[in-house]
Image (cartoon, rainbow, N blue to C red):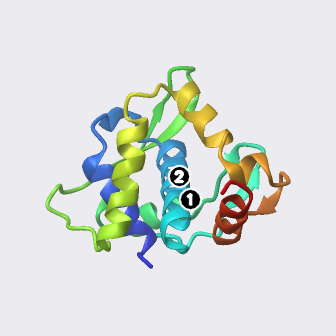
């Protein structure tokens, strides 16, 4: 299992639209990557305990990892609605995230799938995932168990 900061750094390094890399977007991209990896390999990429709150799958682990690292910069800016957002960026593009090949593939898949999506379409995708559709709000999401459940009911 990778460190959260390495997964964050991989997204920051490979996502083509750097101005879109808010804490919310990166967090939800890692949720999608963890879900994808659980579906394919029965384990998450990150050690994050995903929580389904009123904003979908959200945790502060990504922001905490970014703020505690010496490789990620966090700056306050505003989104297109005039609300504050935390913008993430790498301090150096020379950082090499420590990820397994399957972990890299899962994150690259999420990047390829979402890089052309505006925020509303991106959020619709996140909210349409099996763990969100089939779990109670304000609960932790066991992605490994939910992936097995999904595969058992959709095979």
- Can you name the residue that lies furthest to the left here? 94
Vertical relation: 2 (above or below) 15: below
Residue 23 percent location from the top left of the image? 50, 47
- Can you name the residue that lies furthest to the bottom here? 1
Per the rendering, the mark at residue 63 is: none
Residue 151 percent location from the top left of the image? 65, 61
**Residue sitting at 37 percent across and 44 percent down?**
111
Residue 135 percent location from the top left of the image? 81, 55
**Residue sitting at 31 percent across and 58 percent down?**
10
Is 114 situated left or right of 16 in this image?
right
Residue 107 percent location from the top left of the image? 38, 55
- Can you name the residue that lies furthest to the front here? 155
What is the secondary structure assignment of the residue under circle 2?
Answer: helix
Quadrant of the image for the C terminus?
bottom right
Vertical relation: 87 (above or below) 106: above
Q: Please identify the quarter of the rendering in which residue 83 is found.
A: top right
Crowding at label 1, few (<14), some or many (≥20) Cα neighbours within 10 Å?
many
Crowding at label 2, few (<14), some or many (≥20) Cα neighbours within 10 Å?
many
Residue under numbered circle 1: 35
Q: Nearer the viewer, residue 40 or 37?
A: 40
Is 54 situated left or right of 121 in this image?
right
What is the secondary structure assignment of the residue under circle 1?
Answer: helix
Is 142 situated left or right of 29 in this image?
right
How far apart are the two marked residues, 1 and 2, measured between alpha carbons? 5 Å
Per the rendering, the mark at residue 32 is: 2
């Amino acid at each position: 299992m990778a460190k959260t900061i390495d997964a964050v750094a991989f997204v920051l390094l490979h996502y083509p639209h750097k101005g879109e890399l808010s804490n919310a977007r990166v967090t939800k991209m890692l949720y999608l990557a963890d879900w994808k990896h659980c579906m394919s390999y029965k384990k998450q990429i990150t050690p994050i305990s995903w929580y389904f709150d009123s904003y979908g799958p959200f945790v502060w682990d990504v922001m905490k990892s970014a703020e505690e690292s010496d490789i990620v910069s966090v700056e306050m800016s505003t989104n297109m609605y005039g609300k504050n957002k935390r913008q993430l960026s790498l301090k150096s593009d020379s950082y090499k995230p420590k990820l397994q090949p399957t972990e890299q593939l899962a994150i690259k898949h999420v990047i390829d799938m979402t890089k052309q999506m505006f925020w509303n379409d991106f959020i619709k995708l996140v909210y349409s995932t099996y763990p969100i559709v089939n779990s109670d709000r304000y609960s932790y999401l066991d992605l490994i168990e939910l992936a097995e459940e999904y595969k058992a009911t959709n095979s």
